[in-house]
Image (cartoon, helix red, strand yellow):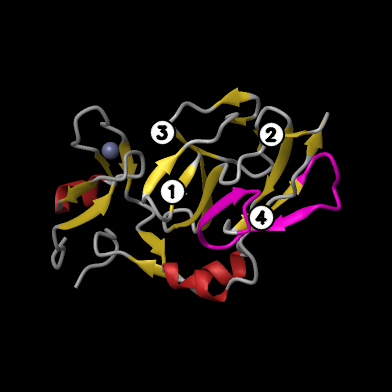
Amino acid sequence: MSGFKTTLIDCQACGRRIMVRAADAERGSIACSHLGCGAVNILSAAFQYDENIVHGLPAFGKLTYLGDSQLIYPLQFGRNTLGTSDACTVQLNRFMHNGRCYISRRHCTLTVTFDKWTGQLRYHLQDGAVDNQAQTHQYSLNGTRLNATPLQKTEIVDVENGGIFTLGGVDSFRLSHYVIPSAMLDTYKVELDFNPDRTQ
Ligand SMILES: [Zn+2]
């Protein structure tokens, strides 16, 4: 293990920093040292993906309205605010049900990030959105559900490919991830310092 440098990685479970020493790299795994986590991070696949890959992607996923599959809303990288306001990143139609619209002007936030470990995009959903003027997070009037389970206030959940979320209890949307092609991913692979094969 000559040439091994002690290095920090992000725990794949909790996201906090953990220190990798030569002995961990030799063993091929490390248990997260943070209280309440303890997840075993596998080090044998000692590479990650360069997040600059996102600059070359043609799309970042989309939402399809379940009430009308012609209604498709494209997403952007980073924070997407969803609601009926024209100030939203994704302005939704004012779907009327018995004369009422159940979607708030700024209803929920869907954040698209790049997971450098899996090399794929991740989608996090939270009820409500940050109000640009007040700079505070304001929740929707009628709530957000993911796969029929109501989100608690302040809860942030991962939405899988094909996951369905419902706004205001009435209007549902299916999320389609943008899946990064593996041929493209290969060109953005980055070897990490703790790769046990990398000796000098
Ligand atoms: Zn952890």
In 3D space, how far apart are the residues under numbered discs 4 and 2 (Cα atoms)?
A: 14 Å
In 3D space, how far apart are the residues under numbered discs 3 and 2 (Cα atoms)?
A: 20 Å
The quadrant in which the C terminus is found is bottom left
- Which residue matches tag 3? 154
The answer to whether the residues at label 4 and label 3 have Cβ atoms under 8 Å apart is: no
**Of callouts 4 and 3, which one flags the residue occurring earlier in the amino acid sequence?**
4
Mark seen at residue 130: 1
> Which marked residue is nearer to the observer: mark 3 or mark 2?
2
- Which residue matches tag 2? 102
x then y, percent, for residue 192: 30, 64
In 3D space, how far apart are the residues under numbered discs 4 and 1 (Cα atoms)?
A: 15 Å
- Which residue matches tag 4? 91
Stretch in magenta? 65-86
**Of callouts 2 and 1, which one flags the residue occurring earlier in the amino acid sequence?**
2
Amino acid identity at mark 4: Gln
Q: Is mark 2 within 8 Å of ligand 1?
A: no
